[in-house]
């Protein structure tokens, strides 16, 4: 019995004079002696077109001048159709959305999301340092809501109460919230997750009430950190991952400008050179990794493994005291002020840059990012974007560092994080 493969290969046996007629990438070598052809299978660079064996057979009939029977013609169509359906089903979800600073010093960034049917649009803080997706809601006491958009589950035909489930979260800066849980359709930048756990706030702390441009958070940490009980819930990224083209999301945060978050793909237009990846320890649930060292201004690079978390939800860069004092020693008039709760300096200071290493790569934070903000609108004293982590118990590579790079959060197994110049 002649197999389909034989027929296919037979249809490729071409007189050597025509050998060159086939694109070189397909024909690896042509053995001139026996007229034999060695085929190197290469992935079709044009994406997902597959080989249709019935079409090869059809062509073989044509080639030998034999009219192809009707069933062969039908078989070609059947296989094309099934292949189209199959390719339509494979991973192809992606999303892309803006990361908008909520004030003039980039204290946090918000991203438009839609929840429910019909879609309710809220502006949420995508936070790789936590894993709860919670929103101001119709259940939040009105005296705790000051200008925020709210999610009203009763106005959504697709909302479902996750009965008996509650949540309560406390952030590192002392802020916090608690509430109850619904599932509903949730999209970011066109990427939809059906039945995403949406944690509706029954109570929020004052710092959230005062932040009128922030309607809640989307936790993008590892789901182990989720506070919903009795059963913890998955993050948007964990829910979306099975459908994503690539198991990644990227952060392109910008200084005093709108950046973006992408899901499911790495946009090569958003960075220059190569992405340098480094290992992530996902316990207890943060994107924990090491810096390979640092340098201050034009000083020599100090190689040193500095473990910390890449956290889009934290505004500033918090590093060990030894590094921070080495930095501010270069700043005339700088001091670690108990009164102001951190390193301050005269706003007129000329600050050095700060460079951090990821493996062999180097990323330089411009001085402007570290001249973070005036203590008050009329003050000549400024607060640094680089502060000591000694009170935190953890080093935090917050927005001041992340906005100096294009960052790839890779949910592969094992997870890893990548940094590129932009
Ligand atoms: C992980 C962040 S909070 C967040 N990004 N949701 C954090 C943790 C601990 C301290 Cl001490 C300060 C900040
Ligand atoms: C992510 C958490 S904690 C943190 N500041 N890193 C947060 C974000 C925004 C506000 Cl207004 C209050 C708290």
Image (tube, rainbow, N blue to C red):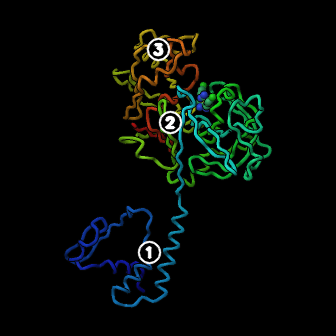
Label 3 neighbour load within 10 Å: few <14, some 14-19, many 20+:
many
Dot 3 and dot 2 residues touching (CB under 8 Å): no
- 138 left or right of 100 in image: right
For this rendering, which residue is in front, 151 or 64? Answer: 151
Decide if residue 293 is in sight here.
no
Up/down of 376 relative to 199, above or below: above
Q: Quadrant of the N terminus?
A: bottom left
C-alpha separation, residue under disc 1 versus residue under disc 3: 69 Å
Decide if residue 329 is in sight here.
yes
C-alpha separation, residue under disc 2 versus residue under disc 1: 47 Å
The residue that mark 1 highlights is: 52
Q: Given this view, does label 1 or label 3 mark the residue nearer the observer?
A: 3
* Residue in view at x 58 percent, y 19 percent: 391
Q: Which mark is residue 266?
A: none
Residue 220 sits in quarter = top right
Q: Kindly state the secondary structure of the residue where label 1 is placed.
A: loop
- 356 left or right of 202 in image: left
Label 1 neighbour load within 10 Å: few <14, some 14-19, many 20+:
some
Residue 338: % across, % down: 57, 11
Up/down of 149 relative to 117, above or below: above
N-terminal-most mark, 1 or 3 = 1
């Amino acid at each position: 019995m002649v197999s389909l493969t034989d027929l296919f290969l037979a249809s490729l046996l071409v007189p050597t004079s025509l050998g060159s007629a086939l694109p070189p990438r397909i024909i690896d070598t042509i053995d001139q002696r026996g007229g034999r052809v060695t085929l190197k299978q290469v992935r079709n660079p044009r994406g997902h077109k597959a080989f249709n064996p019935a079409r090869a057979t059809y062509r073989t009939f044509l080639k030998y001048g034999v009219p192809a029977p009707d069933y062969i013609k039908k078989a070609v169509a059947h296989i094309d159709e099934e292949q189209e359906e199959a390719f339509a089903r494979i991973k192809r979800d992606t999303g892309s959305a803006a990361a908008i600073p909520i004030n003039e010093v980039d204290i946090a960034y918000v991203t438009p999301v839609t929840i429910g049917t019909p879609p309710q649009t809220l502006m949420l803080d995508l936070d790789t340092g936590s894993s709860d997706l919670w929103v101001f809601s119709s259940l939040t006491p009105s005296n705790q809501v000051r200008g925020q958009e709210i999610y009203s589950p009763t106005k959504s035909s697709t909302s479902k109460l996750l009965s008996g489930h509650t949540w309560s979260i406390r952030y590192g800066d002392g802020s916090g919230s608690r509430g109850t849980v619904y599932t509903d359709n949730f999209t970011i930048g066109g990427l939809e997750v059906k039945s995403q756990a949406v944690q509706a706030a029954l109570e929020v702390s004052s710092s959230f009430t005062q932040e009128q441009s922030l309607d809640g958070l989307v936790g993008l940490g590892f789901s182990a950190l989720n506070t919903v009980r009795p059963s913890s819930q998955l993050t948007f990224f964990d829910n979306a991952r099975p459908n994503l083209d690539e198991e990644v999301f990227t952060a392109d945060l910008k200084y005093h400008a709108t950046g973006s978050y992408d899901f499911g793909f790495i946009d090569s237009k958003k960075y220059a050179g190569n992405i340098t990846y480094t290992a992530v320890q996902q316990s207890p649930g943060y994107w924990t990794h090491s810096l390979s060292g640092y340098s201050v201004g034009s000083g020599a690079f100090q190689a040193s493994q500095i473990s910390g978390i890449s956290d889009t939800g934290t505004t500033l860069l918090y590093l060990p005291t030894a590094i921070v004092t080495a930095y501010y020693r270069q700043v005339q008039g700088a001091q670690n002020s108990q009164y102001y709760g951190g390193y301050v300096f005269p706003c007129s200071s000329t600050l050095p840059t700060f460079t951090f290493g990821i493996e062999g790569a180097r990323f330089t934070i411009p001085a402007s990012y570290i001249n973070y903000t005036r203590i008050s609108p009329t003050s000549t004293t400024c607060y640094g974007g680089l502060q000591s982590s000694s009170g935190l118990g953890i080093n935090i590579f917050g927005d001041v560092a992340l906005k100096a790079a294009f960052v790839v959060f890779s949910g592969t197994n094992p997870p890893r994080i990548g940094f590129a110049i932009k």
